[in-house]
Image (cartoon, rainbow, N blue to C red):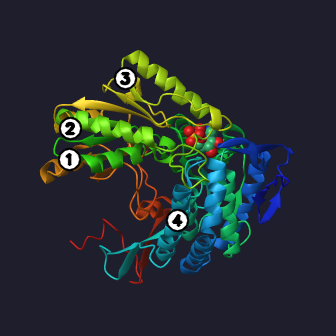
Amino acid sequence: MSAVKTYKNLIGGEWVASRSGKTFENLNPANTDDVVGIFQASDQNDVNDAVAAAQKAFETWRLVPAPRRAEIIFRAGELLTQRKEQYAKDMTREMGKVLKETRGDVQEAIDTAYFMAGEGRRLFGATVPSELPNKFAMAIRVPLGVVGMIAPWNFPMAIPSWKLFPALVCGNTCVIKPAEDTPLSTFNLVQTLIDAGLPKGVINIVTGFGPEAGAPIVNHPDVRAISFTGSSEVGRIVGEAAAKSFKPCSLEMGGKNAIIVLDDANISLAIDGAVWGAFGTTGQRCTAASRMIVQKGAYNEFVDKFVAKAKSLKVGDGLDEKNEMGPQINEQQINTSIKYVDIGKKEGAKVLAGGNRLEGAHKKGWFFEPTIFGDGNAKMRIAQEEIFGPVATVIPVSSVEEAVEIANGTPYGLSSSLYTRDVNKAFRAIRDIYAGITYINAPTIGAEVHLPFGGVKATGNGHREGGLGAVDFYTQWKSVYIDYSDKLQRAQIDTGE
Ligand code: ADP
């Protein structure tokens, strides 16, 4: 076996060890004997160095014209395209999801690069008439400064790209902390940006654990904004800490997303969507469908086919192309799935498929069976709380109105989906479902990078990633008034009366 590689932090353009000298191992969730890499366990001191480097770099980076900044992001997109296969393999090895999906994850970073590269020649502001003669008025976008980014493990390249690319095009400098379970993919992304020509200090990466390496980024007085993706529990800590120093803070958190299937739906299509929505990424997407709300006329057929398909899914190492579902990310997530299966049984739901950790040939990894509960009801904890594993609950309903009410009846509001052939019902659901994303005749997953991404209630705090939402977050408005009248003109006072 070749020696395990040690990865260092990137601070001010140099690869450096953590000041404490502490490190941690990144394990392959499909085979925990396989150590993917050794990474720095950073703390406050490393974060201080990274923020100082980013602060220094901001003074020159903000003056680089946005189209030039964007050209670097475009080049990064080109390089990612060349490296897609290798980066996908690295990602499957550290995160577990199957190769088809990790290729998609890298592709999402490529799409984001090309979209945001175009933004470099837009970054639209507004010119508006002044109320006074011989006076010009406009609102322009300016960067925020040093932005701190804290990322989760389920989209280890796509989510960092959603944060980094718009922030950089807008003229900010960055300190990013990847999730402790998947730092390698962020390294690959950052290495690509360096190879594309990003100047020293514009991007800094510190690896480590949340309280030790994440919290100091949030609390640092020179960090001007925070972008966080992760659990609602940690999001609350991050949001409260950021509020103390009035930092803009974008939080993208949990979900309990529902697929509604009406009697008139194309049931085969709905089954395909349900299997992909529930078990894609092993159910570990914030947009995963963990509730299937099915009208009674379609219930039996839906359940029979859904269960049959779930049972036929090939579970195993994502690097083997024949496997359709990979492992969970770590022991803790497996334990969460086990815990909720137990809760569901006690609540009276019926296990129709799966329900167990996979042993035998799967013993060295964190594998869990695709699991379906039938006869669920909206109040059960398995239908209310985010599980973040391959566990779905089917809930029978009588009408579209009841379905929408149940879909809306959780603390979260990220994604949602409705299968129907009735255009009137579709449009009413689009209007009435309280969520950031609604799909018609498609599952809850599949966001495209040029549309806003985010949700309501416990899912988010009003910001959006992707699309123009990202540009809004990574810039602030400056209003500019240019008076060419050569005399004092007073707004609201010299009204011309
Ligand atoms: P997940 O369920 O995806 O593991 P978490 O919310 O636990 O979600 O973690 C998301 C990110 O937040 C990770 O990078 C993690 O290290 C970081 N994190 C965890 N705790 C804190 C904290 N107290 N302050 C800042 N970041 C944290």
Place of residue 387 in the rendered image (x, y in percent of width and height, measured from the top left)? 48, 33
Place of residue 178 in the rendered image (x, y in percent of width and height, measured from the top left)? 65, 50
- At label 1, which amino acid type do we have? Ala
Q: CA distance from mark 1 to mark 2?
A: 8 Å
Place of residue 443 in the rendered image (x, y in percent of width and height, measured from the top left)? 34, 49
Q: CA distance from mark 2 to mark 3?
A: 18 Å
Q: Which residue is mark 2?
A: 298
Image point 64% across, 70% down: which residue? 83
Labels 4 and 3 touching (C-beta < 8 A):
no
Q: Which residue is mark 3?
A: 350
Q: Which circle's residue, 3 or 1, is located before the other in the chain?
A: 1
- At label 3, which amino acid type do we have? Lys
Ligand 1 within 8 Å of disc 2? The answer is no
Against 83, residue 335 (above or below) is above
Q: Select label 4 or label 1 by which is in front.
A: 1
Q: Which residue is mark 1?
A: 265
Image point 34% across, 49% down: which residue? 272
Q: Which circle's residue, 2 or 3, is located before the other in the chain?
A: 2
Could you tell me if residue 389 is visible in this image? yes
For residue 29, which numbered disc appears in the image? none
Labels 2 and 3 touching (C-beta < 8 A):
no
